[in-house]
Amino acid sequence: MVQVEVTTTTAVLTIISDLRLDGDVLVLYDFHIEGPGAGSLGLKGVRQVIRAAMEAYGVESLEIHGYRRTTGATPGRWPDVLRFTRR
């Protein structure tokens, strides 16, 4: 399990996740994120964080497998897997 604090010009996020490397894919599972709220980082900020993680681990793609929602919209629902690749 890893816990990372990501600080950007617009937000501070805390990410908690288990991870594994499957070849050139970094898989983050049981993924939790805490921060100032949905949309506060923006799409550009999300891409920057994902790109930095892929570069740090030297992988070509990254998958995020979230955990069952405990609060917010539709508690109890499992989120879809998110997949990102280098351009």
Image (cartoon, grey):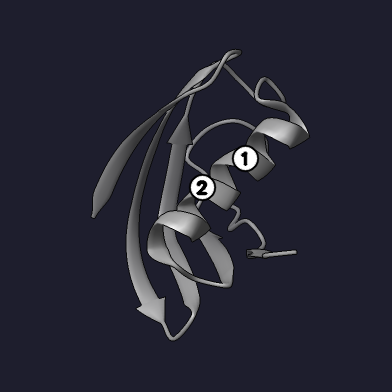
User: In the picture, which quadrant includes the N terminus?
Assistant: bottom left
Question: Between residues 25 and 28, which one lies in front from this camera angle?
Answer: 25
Question: Between residues 55 and 19, which one lies in front from this camera angle?
Answer: 55
Do the numbered discs 2 and 1 sit on residues whose CB atoms are within 8 Å? yes
Residue 8 position, x and y percent, is 53, 20
**Number of numbered discs present?**
2
Residue 70 lies, with reference to residue 2, above or below; the image says above
In the image: residue 84, left or right of residue 9: right
- Residue at 66%, 32% in the rendered image: 45
Dot label at residue 52: 2
Quadrant assignment, res 37: top right
Residue 71 position, x and y percent, is 52, 33
Residue sitting at the far left: 1
Q: Secondary structure at mark 1?
A: helix
Q: Secondary structure at mark 2?
A: helix
Taking the image as drawn, is residue 79 in sight?
Answer: yes
- Residue at 67%, 44% in the rendered image: 47
Residue 16 position, x and y percent, is 34, 43
The three-letter code of the residue at mark 2 reads Ala
Question: Between residues 84 and 60, which one lies in front from this camera angle?
Answer: 60
In the image: residue 47, left or right of residue 5: right
- Residue at 47%, 52% in the rendered image: 53
In the image: residue 66, left or right of residue 80: left
In the picture of the structure, the residue carrying the numbered disc 1 is 48
Residue 76 lies, with reference to residue 26, above or below; the image says above
User: In the picture, which quadrant includes the C terminus?
Assistant: bottom right
Q: Judge the density around disc 2: few (<14), some (14-19), many (≥20) Cα neighbours within 10 Å.
A: few
Residue 50 position, x and y percent, is 57, 49
Residue 26 lies, with reference to residue 30, above or below; the image says below
The three-letter code of the residue at mark 1 reads Gln
- Residue at 54%, 60% in the rendered image: 64
Residue 39 lies, with reference to residue 18, above or below; the image says above
